[in-house]
Amino acid sequence: MTGEGSLGAPTRQIIDWQNPDFADPVKLDEEMRRVFDICHGCRRCFNLCDSFPRLFDLIDSSPAEDVENLKSEDFKPVVEACTLCDMCFMTKCPYVPPHPFMLDFPHLMLRHRFVHAEKGAFVQQQLAEMDRNGALAAPIAPLVNWASAKDNKLTRPLMEAVTGIDAKATLPKFAGRTFVSAAKKQESIVNASAPAYGKRKAALYATCFVNYNKPETGMDARAVLNHIGVETKVAYPGCCGMPFLEQAELSRVASNAAKVSKELVTLIDEGYDIIALTASCGLMLKFEWALVCPDDENVKKVAAHTFDIDQYVVDVAKKEGLPSGLSGGLTSLPEGVTVHLACHARAQNMGPKAAEMLKMIPDTPVDVVERCSGHGGTFGVVKPTHDVGVKVGKPVFKAVNAKPRGHIVSDCPLAAQHIFAHTDTPAKEPEHPIQIMARAFGLKT
């Protein structure tokens, strides 16, 4: 039996969302109280996010100062503040499985959202329709970007009043051409002099953000992989479903997992590794899909063959080596890089691969920030929780401001944007770590 303080790795349990007990409000309430009572007695997670201070304040202000006498309707603010970052599960909680207490706070919050499908979550649900939104926005991207710009005093107050999107929140811009479309227009030439040449093939899973919002991240990733000798192909069967997971629309997650994994498996069978270009999507493909769809063989196969882009570059460097010399080696970036280790990258339990990759660049200062940025997808943009997201991110903002660098990067594009918007950094824009590698290899200016 594993006890508190065990060195065993946390293990996630299947999300048994099709079991009638999962959706039973009475059984859910019993489990909420059981877990809250354990958290109340521990309080180790008090400084991770706003869920725990809200929970502890709720208990401390109750007449008996215990969980037993709390009102179930008062649980909602605790659930609302959870961004599903998984940091309590991965880094703090001593009672996660295989401990007998079997405590998984984020997935309990997910279950609460599933059972108590919020009638007022319409905006978040529409924001989660990434493929629809991206397809509609691309043809009129300049107009959409003008209307959604934070400094647009005409449209943003109106948007806040009508949709509930906070006027102070920085929203991602849309690209006029998707990554998939841009990749088709550009020839992929693999560096025949690289040590890895002929040994690796990688299918870049575009992800909705890279495909619709920031294709340059995908183009830079492809350029880096080609430069280090990896043959590449771009694939995007559809969104991984992370936005639906945030809203506890688990049937939609399962549907997307089945659709996307079916196509990715054909690439795996052709010898391609699957490369995720954002941390949240990597987490979905490697872990969350398998918890929602435990019997899907395609999902299992994708999980076994998926790499985060930073993880993949590090793996190639260690096993085959990187190009070197004046014609292809890495050159220093003396202005330095601040790398934010995204929560969903940390939750993959693969180590700080972004930092490890960037530290390969010679004579380049790399500062690491290892706390939640506070953004959390739609959490960071809607009116009820935007200010909470800024509050949670303040330690990160403070760390970035304390040692300004020329580049600020994160494997989570929304986290990078959130940090960039709330810091006085000399960086010109928020970036992905792979874009820094592209710059160091001389593949972009």
Image (cartoon, rainbow, N blue to C red):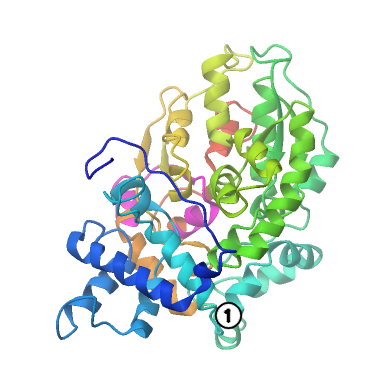
Residue 80 at least partly seen: no
Quarter of the rendering occupied by the C terminus: top right
Q: Identify whether 99 is placed above or below 187.
A: below
On screen, residue 115 versus residue 189, left or right, reads left
Q: Is residue 404 magenta?
A: yes
Residue at x 50%, y 67% (from the top left corner): 22
Residue 81, image quadrant: bottom left
Residue 352 percent location from the top left of the image: 42, 35
- Pick the front one: 118 or 364: 118
Residue 190 at least partly seen: yes
On screen, residue 82 versus residue 442, left or right, reads left
Quarter of the rendering occupied by the N terminus: top left
**Quick one: label 1, few (<14), some, or many (20+) residues within 10 Å?**
many
Residue 201, image quadrant: top right
Residue 275 percent location from the top left of the image: 64, 36
Q: Which residue is mark 1?
A: 156
- Bounds of the magenta segment: 397-418
Q: Is residue 282 magenta?
A: no
On screen, residue 99 versus residue 213, left or right, reads left
The amino acid at mark 1 is Arg
- Pick the front one: 245 or 421: 245
Residue 155 percent location from the top left of the image: 62, 82
Secondary element at image label 1 = helix
Residue at x 56%, y 84% (from the top left corner): 119
